[in-house]
Amino acid sequence: MLIKDDKLYMRIRFFIVIVIPAFITCYNTIGLIWHIGYTKEITATLTAIQVFLGSCIEISNKNYRENKEKEDENN
């Protein structure tokens, strides 16, 4: 996966790094306070998804930087 648009990358990264963990924390806290069923299971699942997406976006960023460096060297 290679994201070439800087604005799109920053929006996706913000969502993955800031919004999703904040939502998971909020859901977990409210779920535990109000005894919502399966709170631990749901937050564990969401955290696993967030870690996966974070890894994908960082791999994309690494590939983008490496390709940009190669292009800069060739020019």
Image: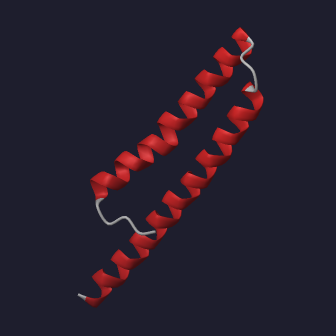
Identify the residue at horizontal 59%, vertical 22% (top origin). 26
Residue 49 at x, y = what percent? 62, 47
Tell whether 48 sits left or right of 7. Answer: right
Which quadrant of the structure image shows residue 40? top right
Choose between 70 and 19: the one closer to the eye. Answer: 19
Quadrant placement of the C terminus: bottom left
Residue at image position (40%, 70%) is 65
Of 10 and 39, nearer the camera is 39
User: Farthest residue in the top direction?
Assistant: 34
Percent position of residue 71, x then y: 30, 83
Q: Farthest residue to the left: give it.
A: 75
Colouring convention used in this rendered image of the protein = secondary structure
Quadrant hosting residue 3: bottom left
58 w.r.t. 36: above or below: below
Q: Nearer the viewer, residue 15 or 69?
A: 15
Please determine whether, in this image, residue 45 is positioned above or below residue 53.
above
Q: Can you say whether 24 is above or below 75 in the image? A: above
Q: Where does residue 6 sit, x and y in percent of width and height? A: 30, 58
Which residue appears farthest toward the front when viewing the image? 37
Task: Count the labels in the image.
Answer: 0
64 on left or right of 26: left
Q: At 43% from the left edge and 76% from the top edge, which residue is drawn?
A: 66
**What residue is at 71 percent from the left and 10 percent from the top?**
33
